[in-house]
Image (cartoon, grey):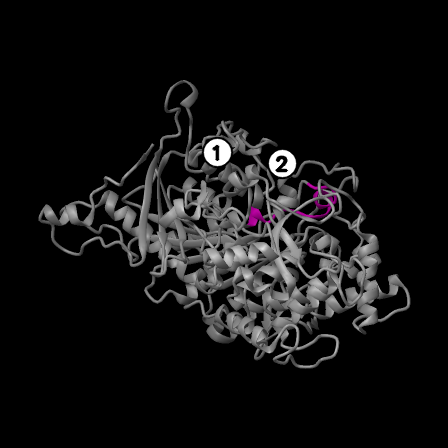
């Protein structure tokens, strides 16, 4: 049931004559709702429903089911239904939900906090408090959900901070920080960190409310999660030229949300303390929980891992006690003063920012995917995961690069090999080769290159930056109106990006008319080549120069110097310091991660931290062989046979961090973990079921051949 908070508020306690500090709602926080989820059936007849904190009432069985729960009215799903389905899609969006991949055995709602596999559904009762953090403009709208399980112990208080991964909404870390923390009896402070599913459909002026339901911008009012900063007249004018476009919060909020990921995570922690004090405080002790007596761990994956590290860097009040970051995006401020050695050889390309290497990869990946060393011939539910349906367009990309002097070679094979070599020189390794194929086929390059340049430069939806926009598209790439049902369920099904649910990246300037990125025709080449001109433009925004000519951008170039300056100023706002203030920290990363390559992220960050904190650093780095970025891809043919999940190592790192903070147990040494892929028949989805032997735990004291160390200011990683 949904109710207005009735726990003793600061004002109520003050009226009772209490003394000492009062429990103050943190600045900028507005409470939205508090809901009890008893994990038992409530209501009668057709209105009967079960919800809990972790699974939305679905339990292990429901989260593992291939189909999401149905809506009573798909055109008008309720907030409760959307919450349930958002938990379903976010859990499955970052973890492998298949039994053969470890779900229900190595992790899952039925696996206890100490690793015991049970037959239980794993429902966790408790209360969820939802609030919004704003900066006074009404446009920031960072959502926080504090989950307090019934198992929370006031005598042994703990909080887990879970910033969302990727561009996901408030439940984006439910499968990582959420599951681990709730099982431990900790309050869990989830936040979207200024991202989330905010889709403003410009044609009908509808938006997502904070609770996920949709309404017109006027009806939503103050509960609108995101609306583009356009007047009605400006929106009408834009619609007349580019109809059926969709504004996306992460890209178009004009807030550069990444700059606040750490601060938002800290705000979530402070709100969690407020909630606990409001619920458990008494007139004689109004603030029983403080940073000093409450154990706080920041733990999440990908962008959430980045937010956790940034929060530790910015934590001047000592709120956070420890950090666990899995596959984090670490925006490196410099490449000077440190280095990386892998297998005894110096790594040349390292320490680049997300915008730099992503936009560069977006240029070369479709051509490199045709190289023999990048082959990944299996197919999956994505019918073009190996570019088998796009070979002609990938070949055209190679040809276009060659014509501009950006690859060498007389044949496609030679040009593809050169493109792959350029990616390796830019910081990827041979462990990433086959993943270029998959990542580009899934649109990661086009999506991130468009979204992040828009976000960093604070460009509005009407900027037509590098000719890119977002909209629904049909099977031949033409812009169409988004399906009403897709918009209605977007809070649950979308992930905050332009991944096609329901919006994809549109190249407005495609020759012959706007097309979605797989069908885009570059004006300079006149052929369908995934929009080479668009990709070159986006990288120029980041580098400040034309890649083909090396010339600096000017006031009249495309893109312009002013646009590039805006993007680069935004990038400067998101850089990490790598100063963890002596906080114990464990970073887990997969060596095969091609989306967040270790040379630009985990390895580089660990090395820079060493130059700042020296031998006193409490950062430990765990590099997992055969680990890649998306555990959710592991059920796909080819992924199942080649790669192992990283999630068990996140859980182990959280366990080890807990033991270190609670009992003073040692942190593990930095190390390489040698895993064993499941193998099986490639292309037949025939990998055998995973066992614990495939993913051995990291050691507290690894052997010499597995130790990650330092030689001077260079991190040394064994092959």
Q: Position of residue 681 (x, y in %)?
A: 79, 39
**Residue under label 2:** 98
Q: Quadrant of the N terminus?
A: top left
2 vs 1, front mark: 1
Q: Left or right: where does residue 31 sit relative to residue 64?
A: left
- Numbered circle sitting on residue 93: none
Mark 2 Cα shell of 10 Å, populated few (<14), some (14-19), many (≥20): some
Q: Position of residue 40 (x, y in %)?
A: 39, 26
Mark 1 Cα shell of 10 Å, populated few (<14), some (14-19), many (≥20): some
**Residue under label 1:** 76
Q: Are marks 2 and 1 in contact (CB under 8 Å)?
A: no
Q: Position of residue 181 (x, y in %)?
A: 42, 45
Q: Quadrant of the C terminus?
A: bottom right
Total marks in image: 2
Q: Residue at x 57, y 79 (%)?
A: 337
Quarter of the image holding residue 445?
bottom right
Decide which of 625, 404 is in the foreground and name it.
404
Compared to residue 43, the image places residue 245 above or below, namely below
Q: Residue at x 31, y 48 (%)?
A: 31
Compared to residue 488, the image places residue 157 above or below, namely below
Q: Which contiguous range is marked in magenta?
A: 636-649
Q: Left or right: where does residue 613 sit relative to residue 634?
A: left
Q: Secondary structure at mark 1?
A: loop
Q: Left or right: where does residue 597 sit relative to residue 194?
A: right
Decide which of 576, 400 is in the foreground and name it.
400
2 or 1: tag closer to the N-terminus:
1
Q: Residue furthest right?
A: 410
């Amino acid at each position: 049931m949904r109710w207005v908070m009735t726990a003793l508020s600061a004002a109520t306690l003050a009226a009772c004559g209490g003394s000492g500090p009062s429990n103050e709602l943190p600045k900028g926080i507005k409470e939205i709702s508090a809901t009890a989820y008893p994990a038992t059936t409530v209501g009668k007849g057709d209105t009967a429903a079960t919800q809990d904190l972790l699974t939305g009432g679905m339990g292990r069985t429901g989260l593992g089911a291939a189909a999401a729960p149905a809506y009573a009215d798909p055109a008008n799903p309720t907030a409760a239904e959307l919450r349930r389905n958002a938990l379903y899609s976010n859990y499955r969006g970052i973890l492998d939900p298949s039994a053969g991949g470890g779900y229900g055995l190595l992790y899952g709602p039925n696996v206890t906090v100490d690793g015991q596999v049970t037959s239980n559904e794993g429902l966790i009762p408790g209360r969820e408090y939802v609030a919004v953090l704003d900066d006074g403009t009404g446009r920031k709208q960072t959502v926080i959900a504090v989950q307090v399980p019934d198992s929370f112990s006031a005598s042994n208080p703990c909080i887990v901070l879970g910033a969302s991964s990727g561009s996901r909404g408030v439940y984006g870390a439910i499968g990582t920080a959420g599951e681990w923390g709730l099982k431990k009896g900790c309050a869990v402070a989830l936040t979207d960190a200024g991202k989330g599913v905010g889709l403003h459909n410009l044609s009908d002026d509808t938006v997502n409310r904070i609770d996920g339901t949709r309404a017109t911008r006027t009806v939503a009012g103050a509960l609108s999660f995101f609306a583009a900063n356009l007047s009605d007249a400006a929106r009408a004018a834009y619609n007349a030229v580019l109809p059926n476009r969709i504004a996306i919060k992460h890209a178009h909020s004009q807030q550069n949300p990444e700059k606040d990921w750490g601060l938002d995570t800290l705000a979530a922690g402070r709100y969690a303390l407020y909630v606990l004090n409001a619920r458990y405080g008494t007139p004689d002790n109004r603030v029983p929980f403080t940073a000093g007596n409450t154990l706080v761990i920041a733990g999440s994956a990908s962008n959430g891992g980045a937010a956790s590290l940034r929060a530790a860097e910015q934590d001047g009040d000592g709120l956070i006690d420890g950090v666990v970051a899995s596959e984090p995006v670490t925006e490196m401020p410099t490449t000077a003063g440190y280095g990386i050695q892998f297998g005894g050889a110096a790594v040349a390309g390292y320490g680049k920012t997300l915008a730099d290497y992503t936009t560069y990869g977006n240029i070369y990946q479709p051509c490199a995917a045709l190289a023999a060393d990048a082959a990944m011939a299996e197919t999956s539910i994505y019918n073009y995961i190996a570019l088998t349906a796009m070979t002609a367009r990938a070949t055209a990309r190679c040809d276009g690069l060659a014509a501009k002097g950006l690859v060498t070679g007389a044949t496609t094979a030679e040009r593809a090999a050169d493109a792959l070599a350029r990616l390796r020189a830019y910081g990827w390794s041979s462990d990433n080769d086959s993943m270029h194929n998959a990542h580009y086929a899934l649109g990661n390059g086009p999506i991130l290159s468009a979204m992040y340049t828009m976000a960093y430069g604070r460009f509005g939806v009407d900027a037509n930056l590098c000719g890119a926009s977002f909209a629904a598209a049909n099977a031949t790439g033409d812009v169409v109106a988004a399906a009403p049902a897709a918009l209605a369920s977007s809070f649950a099904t979308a992930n905050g990006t332009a991944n096609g649910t329901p919006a994809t990246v549109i190249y407005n300037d495609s020759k012959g008319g706007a097309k979605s990125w797989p069908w885009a025709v570059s004006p300079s080449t006149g052929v369908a080549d995934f929009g080479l001109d668009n990709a070159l433009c986006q990288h120029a925004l980041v580098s400040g120069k034309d890649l083909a000519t090396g010339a600096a951008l000017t006031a009249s170039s495309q893109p312009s110097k002013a646009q590039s300056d805006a993007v680069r100023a935004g990038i400067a706002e998101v850089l990490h310091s790598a100063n963890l203030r002596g906080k114990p920290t464990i970073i887990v990363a997969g060596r095969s991660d091609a989306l967040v390559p270790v040379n630009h992220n985990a390895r580089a960050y660990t090395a820079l931290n060493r130059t700042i904190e020296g031998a006193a650093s409490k950062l430990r780095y765990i590099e997992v062989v055969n680990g890649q970025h998306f555990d959710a891809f592991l059920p796909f043919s080819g992924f199942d046979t080649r790669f192992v999940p990283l999630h068990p190592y996140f859980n182990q790192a959280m366990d080890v961090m807990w033991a270190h903070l609670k009992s003073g147990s040692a942190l593990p040494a930095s190390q390489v973990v040698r895993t064993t892929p499941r193998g099986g028949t490639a292309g037949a989805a025939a990998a055998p079921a995973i066992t614990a032997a495939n993913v051995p735990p990291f050691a507290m004291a690894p052997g010499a051949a597995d130790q990650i160390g330092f030689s001077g200011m260079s991190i040394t990683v064994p092959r």
